[in-house]
């Protein structure tokens, strides 16, 4: 049963990656900007509740994600190119952005 869950989870993630790339293509009909962030684990109350014994120092804070989107909105020169997939890696409370 668990293996089936991970298969569906992986397929959903791959579909989102393809969607972002497709929406960013010329003639996609979208005039905006598409970027996907790929955090390992977001630091949410639900994750803390259901995974209390896990090392949470590698979880990306929601505040970081909100600030990131705010910065990209206010200063387009800081924003990755449309269609980008940006991995968020948090270690010891510090988050780095890596294009995939």
Image (tube, rainbow, N blue to C red):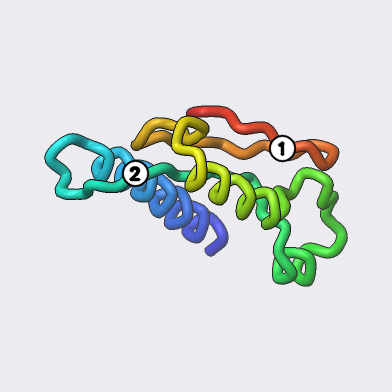
Please state which of residues 6 and 72 is positioned toward the viewer in this rendering.
72
Sequence order check: which comes first, mark 2 or mark 1? 2
In this rendering, the label closer to the viewer, 2 or 1: 2
48 horizontally vs 5: left or right? right
Please state which of residues 38 and 71 is positioned toward the viewer in this rendering.
71
Residue 36 occupies quadrant = top left
**Residue 80 on image: x %, y %:** 45, 32
Tag of residue 51: none
Inter-mark Cα distance, 2 to 1: 23 Å
For disc 2, the neighbor class at 10 Å (few under 14, some 14 to 19, many from 20) is some
For numbered disc 1, what is the local secondary structure?
strand
**Circle 2 residue:** 33
For disc 1, the neighbor class at 10 Å (few under 14, some 14 to 19, many from 20) is some
Who's the residue at 78% across and 65% down the image? Answer: 48
Q: Is residue 43 above or below residue 33?
A: below
Answer whether labels 2 and 1 touch (C-beta < 8 Å).
Answer: no
Q: Residue furthest left?
A: 27
Q: Residue furthest top?
A: 99
Who's the residue at 37% across and 49% down the image? Answer: 16
Who's the residue at 61% across and 32% down the image? Answer: 97
**Circle 1 residue:** 95
Who's the residue at 72% across and 57% down the image? Answer: 43
47 horizontally vs 26: left or right? right
């Amino acid at each position: 049963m668990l293996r089936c869950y991970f298969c569906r989870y992986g397929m959903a993630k791959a579909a989102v990656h393809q969607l972002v790339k497709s929406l960013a293509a010329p003639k996609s009909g979208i005039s905006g900007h598409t970027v996907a962030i790929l955090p390992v684990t977001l630091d949410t109350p639900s994750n803390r509740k259901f995974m209390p014994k896990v090392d949470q120092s590698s979880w990306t804070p929601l505040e970081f994600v909100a600030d990131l989107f705010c910065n990209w909105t206010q200063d387009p020169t800081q924003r990755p190119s449309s269609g980008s997939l940006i991995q968020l890696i948090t270690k010891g409370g510090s988050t780095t952005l890596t294009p995939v």
